[in-house]
């Protein structure tokens, strides 16, 4: 069951990444309109989100490959880092979107 869930999550992440990149290639980006403290908070979240988001694809690929090859000890060691980074990126992505379009 874990294997199926992780493969589905990996595929969903790929679909999201492709749709996100396609959208922004066509539409471009939006500037944050806020000023003062909220602007500092926004950019602090955005910078950490962006840096860690760039790390997620290679981490996820390596994690998945190690599991599929049955190298479970190596898989667990990298998954220990991959999951919290992926979770942080997922949560901060929603926060960045909310701050940019709903705040």
Image (cartoon, rainbow, N blue to C red):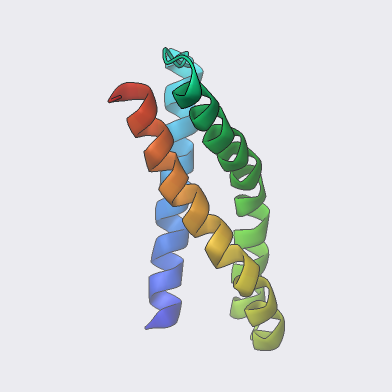
| Near-viewer residue (38 or 53) | 38
State the residue at coordinates (32%, 23%). 101
Q: In which quarter of the image is the N terminus?
A: bottom left
The picture quadrant where one finds residue 12 is bottom left
Residue 52, horizontal then vertical, whole percent: 63, 47
Picture layout, residue 85 above or below residue 44: below
Residue 73, horizontal then vertical, whole percent: 69, 87
All told, the count of numbered labels is: 0
Picture layout, residue 51 above or below residue 87: above
State the residue at coordinates (63%, 81%). 76
Residue 33, horizontal then vertical, whole percent: 42, 12
Picture layout, residue 97 above or below residue 26: below
Residue 5, horizontal then vertical, whole percent: 38, 72
Left-right relation of 94 to 39: left
Left-right relation of 85 to 66: left
State the residue at coordinates (48%, 41%). 17
| Near-viewer residue (84 or 34) | 34
Q: In which quarter of the image is the C terminus?
A: top left
The picture quadrant where one finds residue 51 is top right
């Amino acid at each position: 069951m874990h294997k199926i869930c992780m493969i589905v999550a990996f595929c969903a992440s790929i679909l999201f990444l492709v749709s996100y990149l396609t959208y922004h290639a066509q539409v471009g980006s939006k500037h944050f309109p806020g000023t003062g403290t909220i602007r500092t908070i926004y950019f602090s979240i955005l910078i950490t989100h962006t840096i860690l988001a760039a790390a997620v694809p290679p981490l996820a690929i390596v994690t998945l490959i190690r599991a599929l090859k049955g190298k479970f000890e190596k898989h667990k060691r990298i998954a220990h880092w991959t999951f919290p980074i992926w979770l942080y990126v997922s949560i901060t992505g929603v926060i960045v979107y909310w701050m940019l379009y709903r705040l």
